Amino acid sequence: TEIPIGSPVRTQAIINRYFMKAKKSLGQNFLVDLDALQGIVQAADIKKDDQVIEIGPGIGSLTEQLLKAGAKVFAYEVDEKLPEILHNELPVKIAGAPLSARFKLKMKDILKADFKQDLSDFFDLSKPIKVVANLPYYITTPIIFFLNGSDLKFSSLTLMMQKEVADRLSAHSGTKEYGPLTIAVQAEMAVQSYMTVKSSSFIPRPKVDSSVVVLKPLPAENKIDIANSKHFNWVVKMCFAQRRKTLNNNLKALIPNTDDRAHLIKSLGVDAQIRPEQLTLKQFVQIAAKVPVKN
Ligand code: SAM
C-alpha cells in the first residue's frame, strides 16, 4: 500500500518526478496535511456512493481521500499538466472497481461549468450532489456565487478558503467581519465554519491561514423572501459604502428625502445613530423594499 498523495513526502516526490512548478496564477497550493484532508472529508460527511464535484483536484491529495471514503468524484481542473499526474498517481482500483468507474476529470474552468450537460452521464442528477474543494483562492467568492446561481441542486458546499473570507461568510452582525458578503451569502445559505488550517499545511505555503467552511442551502421555511437579489445586494452594498458612518448617512444616496429616511429607520425599530453592521438580514430586507429598484 502506498503512502497517501497528501503526505509531504509523496507530494514532494510527485512534484520532483513531474518537474511540477506550482502555478501561482492558478492558486496552486497543495495540501500536505492528512488531518486536514480527513477533516474536509468529515466536514462534508462523505458516505459510500456520495456524488461529489471536486473543484481543482491538483495532484489528487483530496481526491484520493474522497475516493477512499466511498465517494464518486467528478472533478473540474484547468492545468493541462495534471491529467497525466492524476491518471498515474491516483489508485488504479477503488474498492475493486477501476478508477474510471469512480472518478471523472473534466478539463474546464469551473466558472464555465454546465452542470446538466457535464454530469449527466456520470451522476444521477435526481440525487443530491456535494461540492468539495480546496479552492483556488483567487476566485473564492466568484465560485460561491456561481454555484449558488447555477442550476446545480447541491446539498452542501464544503470549501477550504482563505480564513479572512471564511470569517466574513460566517460573521454575526455587530462584528467587523460582517458586511455585504456575509449578508449576500447568509440570505441563501447556512454557513458553518468547521476548522482552521495553518499555512504550513500547504506546498507551497500560502501567505494566509485557511478555514474549511460548510455551506448548505436554507430550507424554504427558513428562507427570507428576497424578491430581487440583485437589487437587495446592491442596497446592502450601498448601506455599507462608508462603514464607519451611520446607516442614515449611507442611506442618503438611496433615499434623498430626510423625512423618508427618518421614517424608514424608525420603522426598523432601531436607534437613529445605528451603523450598518448592527443590522440583521431581515432589517436589510426591509430597507431594500423601501428603495426604488434601479434599472
Ligand atoms: N485539491 C488539491 C489539493 O488540495 O492539494 C489542489 C488545490 S489548489 C489550492 C487549487 C486547484 O484548483 C489547482 O489544482 C488549480 O490548478 C485548480 N484551478 C485553478 N483555477 C481553476 C478553475 N477556474 N477551474 C477549475 N480548477 C481550477
Image: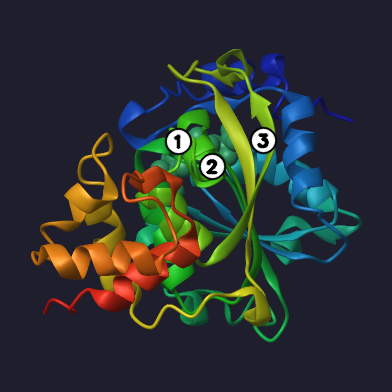
Q: Are marks 1 and 2 in contact (CB under 8 Å)?
A: yes
Quadrant of the image containing the N terminus: top right
The residue at which mark 1 appears reads as 177
Q: Position of residue 164 (x, y in %)?
A: 47, 30
In space, the residues marked 2 and 3 are separated at their CA atoms by: 30 Å
As shown in the figure, which amino acid type bears the numbered disc 3? Ser
Q: Sequence order check: which comes first, mark 1 or mark 2?
A: 2
Asked whether mark 3 lies closer than 8 Å to ligand 1, one says yes
The residue drawn where x is 17% and y is 78% is 292
The residue drawn where x is 44% and y is 62% is 269
Residue 38 vs 131, above or below: the answer is: above
Q: Say what secondary structure mark 2 lies in.
A: loop
Q: Quadrant of residue 215?
A: bottom right
In space, the residues marked 1 and 2 are separated at their CA atoms by: 6 Å
The residue at which mark 3 appears reads as 61
In space, the residues marked 1 and 3 are separated at their CA atoms by: 31 Å
Looking at this view, name the residue that lies furthest to the bottom.
126
The residue at which mark 2 appears reads as 171
Residue 9 vs 244, above or below: the answer is: above
Residue 196 vs 241, above or below: the answer is: above
Q: In the depicted view, which residue is nearer to us: 295 or 75?
A: 295
Mark 3 nearby-residue class (10 Å; few <14, some 14–19, many ≥20) = many
